[in-house]
Amino acid sequence: MDMTLNTNTFKANKNRLNENLESPLEIARRLSKQFALTAAERDYQGGTPKLERDQIRESGLLSLIIPKEYGGLGASWSEAMLVIREIAKADSSLAHLFGFQHLMLATIYLFSKPEQWERWFEQTAQLNWFWGNALNPLDERLIAKVFPSWYEFSGKKSFCSGAIDSEMLIISAKEKVNGTLLIAAIPTGRSGVSLIQDWDNIGQRQTDSGSVTFEKVRVEEHEVLKDPGPLSTPFSCLRPLVAQLILTNIYLGIAEGAFEDAKQYSLHEARPWHTSNIAAVNHDPYILNHYGDFWVGIESTKALTDLAAIRLDNAWQKKTKLSEDERGELAIHVSSAKVLATRTGLDITSKMFEVMGSRSTHAGLRLDRHWRNLRTHTLHDPLDYKLKELGEWALNNVYPKPTFYS
């Protein structure tokens, strides 16, 4: 990696931001317009969106939530979620990768000591590092042997979103003897780490969410996130809520992108049904009824999602003073928004064809990608179990138990 080039690029980006006073959301809108031009074809091809990842690197947005004193842009979570959502409108795979960048940064901040995360924050901002995910707590095949001042990780991880073309990885393993969960941050290029391009799902086809193998990978003590460690305090338990809210904004962005595609097709391509006795689709009462439903779904989801982001900002500012009840209250708001975003998104990405007509199913348009992307993502955290947690709160006043998914 050419660190001089990356550092110069970072400085140029910071100067451009200062000169043009371009906000992160404006940068995201500019990038999204570019991404939208090739999103459908890239979704069809799959693989690593290298050009687009480099455009995100060059934009300076990889350090969006890093405080300014460490070289970042110092955005709040509310601001970051809007940027993620904006990218998702054009390309949900890139939004996934970008969102997980900030989830990984939140992970090291919440689980490690300042002398660890401060250095990683500074290096990420200076060198435009992309962080990949190989944490996946449900995949327990990665085993750690313990030595006096280091560990040896061997095994395999699945669903490693963004690992390919990343500079750093967040990984999790189980200690061989006692089964303790260990989470660490290591360079992606470390000896023994192999990235496997085996991601070929129906949706989110450019997230590189395939597998990573680890063969006797040395992990130093200072790379393990042990103080306070994973999910050990109410504040560290914000990590899964950050993850859930990132996904919520991706789902909402997919729904908004599908809505816009459907709208353009209805206005410019769709034909009225032959018995409707109207000249244009935009006057068909049945079509208008669907768009009314779409609008209510999107607007109500935005309201709930943005409220959850504000509450996350408030909880984040409390840091170690955050109580279990305050964390639980936030969990209820985030889960409620995620349920609504899932339902709204699946409804729009399916019913959009009813307002466009049969010609809209032409394979070349690839309008089915909205549903495929959302359906692929939402299955990784079953909606029924999220509703069960909300039911426990609604009926029994019991907050969701903190896990990596709630």
Image (tube, grey):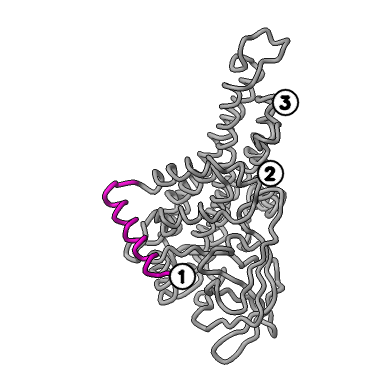
Q: Which residue is mark 1?
A: 1
Q: Which residue is mark 3?
A: 358
Report the Cα–Cα distance between label 3 and label 1.
Answer: 49 Å
Q: How many numbered marks, from 0 up?
A: 3
**Residue drawn at (32%, 56%), measured in percent from left and top?**
14
**Residue drawn at (70%, 68%), measured in percent from left and top?**
139
**Residue 69, relative to residue 372: is it above or below?**
below
143 displayed left or right of 301: right
Q: Residues within 10 Å of mark 2 (few under 14, many from 20)?
A: some
User: Does the magenta-highlighted stretch encompass residue 326?
Assistant: no
Q: Nearer the viewer, residue 283 or 129?
A: 129
Secondary element under disc 2, as helix, strand or loop, is helix
Amino acid type indicated by mark 1: Met
Q: Which residue is mark 2?
A: 372
Q: Nearer the viewer, residue 125 or 383?
A: 125
Which of discs 3 and 2 lies nearer the camera? The answer is 3
Sequence-first disc among 3 and 1: 1
**Residue 172, relative to residue 398: is it above or below?**
below
Q: Nearer the viewer, residue 111 or 354?
A: 354
The stretch in magenta equals: 1-22
Report the Cα–Cα distance between label 3 and label 2.
Answer: 18 Å
Q: Could you say where residue 143 lies in the image, as x and y percent from the top left? A: 68, 79
Amino acid type indicated by mark 2: Arg
Q: Could you say where residue 316 lies in the image, as x and y percent from the top left? A: 44, 59
Q: Could you say where residue 222 lies in the image, as x and y percent from the top left? A: 49, 81
